[in-house]
Image: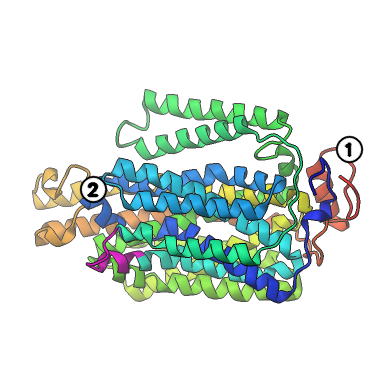
Amino acid sequence: MSQATVPPQATAVTMTHRQILEALSGLLLGLFVAILSSTVISNALPRIITELHGGQSAYTWVVTSALLATTATTPIWGKLADLTSKKTLVQLALGIYVLGSVLAGLAQGTGELIACRVLQGIGAGGLTALAQVIMATMIAPRERGRYSGYLGAVMAVGTIGGPLIGGVIVDTSWLGWRWCFYVGVPFAIVALIVLQKTLHLPVVKRKAEIDWWGATLITAAVSLLLIWVSLAGDQFAWASWQTAAMVVGALILGALAIRVETRAAEPMIPPRLFRNRTITLAVVASIAVGVGMFGASIFLGQYFQISRGQSPTMSGLMTLPMILGLLVSSTVIGRVITRTGRWKRYLVIGSALLTIGFALMGTLRADTSFTLLSVYMLVIGVGLGMTMQNLVLAVQNTVGPHELGAASSVVAFFRSLGGAIGVSALGAVLAHKVKDYTADGLAQLGIPASSSGGGGTLPDVHTLPGPLRAVVESAYGHGAGDIFLTAAPFALIALIAVAFIKEVPLRQHNGNPVSGEVERESTLAAGAGAPMIRTGEQR
């Protein structure tokens, strides 16, 4: 159908359980490679940055550049999904991802690698947003909890299992770290083939303009903010003219973006969505979950390798408690939600566990008992499994099919934004703390600070003499504890946000919400005085 206006239910389809599973297999493969692109390099990064002669700033930006590109492009992909073929879009995203991955594997310096990671992130942004949108198109909200468990399980394996895969690759002499970028390519190609054969959705097209100005301003504001967070305290002081210029610039760009979005016919992030209390509170919580999801996996790998002297492979194996916690909780809770239709209690419990887990990880040191550490990681994993997918589910339950793309991508956008800000901010905190703790430790030994390996590069603890190695291990261990303690308040904010979300039982159909609180929420989202769209009506 290619009319200017289409029935809202035109984007909803009826599929059997088998058809859903077949199509879902391709989507899950695509989502897996998207998550893998951000996490597979976690345990390999110390080796990569050392070989490419980079420092802590490069370490942070190899991760942040991909997250930033994912964040900036997620709402664009989501908006396009409301306007054109979702199948074509997800295949395009897979193609971009493959190109970025191959080029990243060929990079000869940190600058090249960061640029290629941006391309990877653009593809990953499409895969992240479109997986949620397509699943919501195929499956009614009440049944979606059951399948969201599969989505959560894949995200668990990709998020926490990625570092293990990367560790094995970098420890395998005949592969090397470049295969951390190549490894997702076969999965992406298989996903392309599976989706071509199994995904059959109605193509809904309507004339509309992409809000390029809004997308540009949002990207510029977020980018400037992240650049400031990652460079302040290292390249220039926190209280400096550079800080003032970047912060003021980001605020001005943000204000301009809001102005453009409120006037655009087809805004990237529709401001009216934030009149919906559920969406607004879910966005706040998603930012905090993003900090936890990415921050935990990225910096745990560094902690295990530098503070505990483990190999990349062992670093990945040591995160298994978190993988299991996330995997089990997302799968089990997804099925429970499908059976009961209730979801808020699990968001509250998950956010509380996330807060507790981060606070416990704040006690982390180089000599912390691994048994205790396993318990802390398990708590964080269970918390992430309960919150990550269910925040999207809560939002999708409040909007009609015609806005699934925009609403789903808003949550994914802010979760990725939280991850990008978290990695940048926590990386800056870690660099600052490690520098101070190392200086203090060397002073006690009477050794000049330059003897630590200096130059801002990541140390190879295996090449350091005994006393110096102990200082470096202690500094990175204490610094890792500090960044988790810094992340704990974000999890507490998520807990407060989800506590104020009003629970609405999940709908058992894929049309527009038409009754009770869902109807009131959707009316607010559509704007004051706008008529409520009901299933079967023309928009």
Asked if one can make out residue 429 in the rendered structure from this viewpoint, the answer is no
Label 2 crowding class (10 Å Cα cut-off): few <14, some 14-19, many 20+? some
Residue at the image point whose x is 15% and y is 62% from the top: 462
Point out the frontmost of discs 2 and 1.
2
Residue at the image point whose x is 30% and y is 57% from the top: 178
The C terminus lies in which quarter of the figure?
A: top right
Dot 2: element: loop
Q: Position of residue 373 (x, y in %)?
A: 37, 70
For label 2, the residue is 52
Q: Position of residue 343 (x, y in %)?
A: 70, 66
Residue at the image point whose x is 66% and y is 28% from the top: 260
Distance Cα–Cα, label 2 vs label 1:
59 Å
The front one of 80 and 277 is 80
The label shown at residue 529 is 1
Dot 1: element: loop
Q: Position of residue 204 (x, y in %)?
A: 76, 49
Q: Amino acid at mark 1?
A: Gly
Asked if one can make out residue 451 in the rendered structure from this viewpoint, the answer is yes
Q: What's drawn in magenta, residue-wise?
A: 166-177
Q: Is residue 138 left or right of residue 229?
A: right
